[in-house]
Amino acid sequence: MTDVAVPRADAPGTPSATARLLAGAAGRIDAPDVVLALSRDGVRTVHTGGSAEPGPVPRERLHHELGSASKPYAGLLLARLVAQGRVRYEDRAADLLAPGLPVHPAVRRITLRQLLTHTSGLPGLPADFYPQAVPRWSTDPYGNYPADRVVRAFLRARPRHRPGTRWHYSNFAVSVLGHTLAAATGTPWEVLLHQQVLAPLGLGATLLRPGPDGTDATGHRRDGTPLPALDTGGFTAAGALRATPLDLLTFLEAHLGGGGPRDPSLAAALTEVVRPLLRRGWRHAHTHTLTWFHHPSPYGPVLFHAGATLGQQAFLGFRPGTGLAVAATATRRVHRKDTFVATAYELLTETP
């Protein structure tokens, strides 16, 4: 099924041409459910498909697990709290989480900015995460590792590198950021994210836990076996969000200036998170903002983030200079010959 928002002449860049482009791209993705959604200056085109029969709720209105594509929401929250003067990027996480508690000197130096930008020196996951997770790796690796255990693991950690010196992707670090912001504001993470990001942007179909029966997309293993909803345990800030593809477009459009007037602190945060901030990799070829991967394209810089859970994938991206946004979801676990991210990235970088 293809849903084109506004009919126009059949020329490059018009909804009818975009609909064919999305349909062709969806054909390259092997998953029970696929949604490709594109917004150009606020005009939306959505294609849904996949190998499974569609259910009573349209795929674009189901809540899809975002996995690590949740992190830009955490980044926008931090940027808004900074703009409000409630925290600073250079605040030390340990001082906010456990003031006065003895910790390793390197842990004491870790700042909120470093947690978000993967420069804290922390590993991807705590060392003691794996023994409890491996027996349930394909079903529920995170559920038995709650928030208090994440915080304790951070406070007794020994960073692999001096904070601020190396980039190493870390679900652990972003999860610690979430618990730190909750402690600093005296507000539970779910409430804080809703108050500061979801409600102001009108993201009523973006949730931190499964929705009512029949409203969530079902993930699948590589062999097509259905999976239950993911429980992220104490790693909420790093990957717990689930959203409809339509809400994903609304979130991306906000970064492109859509949605009308906003609170000054939210406007400042949306500006801050798109600003190139650091470089990494061979010859520092890879650029990042506070929360987005930042690449060049033939049509100007693109900002994006992908995510995967046990049985679902998501991709979010936008081009600030051209008003283009791409949101994509699929309900099958990543596999070796998977084309999902490459296809979504191509839509973002090569669509005129």
Image (cartoon, grey):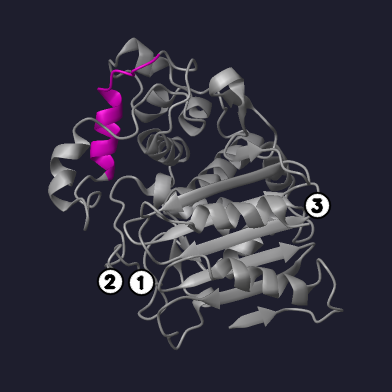
Q: Quadrant of residue 326?
A: bottom right
Q: Where is residue 197 in the image (x, y as percent from the top left)?
A: 58, 53
Q: Distance between the residues labelled 2 and 1?
A: 7 Å
Q: Give the range drawn in magenta.
A: 147-161
- The mark total stands at 3
Q: At 39% across and 61% down in the image, what residue appears?
A: 312
Mark 1 residue element = loop
Q: Do the residues labelled 3 and 1 touch (CB within 8 Å)?
A: no
Q: Residue 218 shows which numbered tag?
A: 1
Task: Of the two numbered discs 2 and 3 on the same chain, state the one appearing first in sequence.
Answer: 2
Q: At 76% across and 73% down in the image, what residue appears?
A: 17
**Callout 3 environment at 10 Å: few (<14), some (14 to 19), or many (20+)?**
some
Q: At 64% across and 69% down in the image, what residue appears?
A: 22
Q: In which quarter of the image is residue 84?
A: top right
Q: Nearer the viewer, residue 73 or 86?
A: 73
Q: Where is residue 298 in the image (x, y as percent from the top left)?
A: 76, 44
Disc 3: which residue:
322
Q: Do the residues labelled 2 and 1 touch (CB within 8 Å)?
A: yes
Q: Distance between the residues labelled 3 and 1?
A: 34 Å
Q: Distance between the residues labelled 2 and 3?
A: 38 Å
Q: Is residue 150 magenta-colored?
A: yes
- Can residue 101 be spotted in the picture? yes
